[in-house]
Image: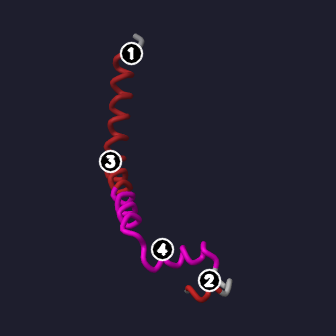
Amino acid sequence: MRVARRLGKLSLDQQNRILRRIHPRPSTLTWERMMALRASIAKDVAPILQARREAERDCFDIKFEVA
């Protein structure tokens, strides 16, 4: 890769992308695991939040029902 850089066949951007793909940094791996965990938590919590919103809407309707 170093030879390709010297000969101008490989740009610094391309080299960095290749290196990241071959050997990602620990911080990148940690970030990806955190984002995957966040997505799984959001997916698990979504139905609970939806049910809560519906219950709050029902309570609001009952509380402010015009007779």
| Residue 13 found in image quarter | bottom right
The disc labelled 1 sits on which kind of residue? Phe
For the record, the magenta segment spans 11-37
Lower position in the chain sequence, tag 2 or tag 1: 2
**Label 1 sits on residue:** 64
Lower position in the chain sequence, tag 4 or tag 3: 4
Q: Residue at x 39, y 22 (%)?
A: 61
Q: Residues within 10 Å of mark 3 (few under 14, many from 20)?
A: few
Q: Determine whether, in the image, residue 53 is placed left or right of residue 11.
A: left
The quarter of the picture where the N terminus appears is bottom right
Q: Determine whether, in the image, residue 14 is placed left or right of residue 38.
A: right
- SS at mark 1? loop
Q: Is residue 65 above or below residue 57?
A: above
Question: Does the magenta stretch mainly form a helix, a strand or a loop?
Answer: helix
Q: Residues within 10 Å of mark 1 (few under 14, many from 20)?
A: few
User: How many numbered badges does the structure rendering display?
Assistant: 4
Q: Residue furthest right?
A: 8
**Callouts 2 and 1 close, C-beta under 8 Å:** no
- SS at mark 3? helix
The stretch drawn in magenta includes residue 15: yes
Q: Nearer the viewer, mark 4 or mark 1?
A: 4
Q: CA distance from mark 2 to mark 3?
A: 48 Å
**Label 3 sits on residue:** 45
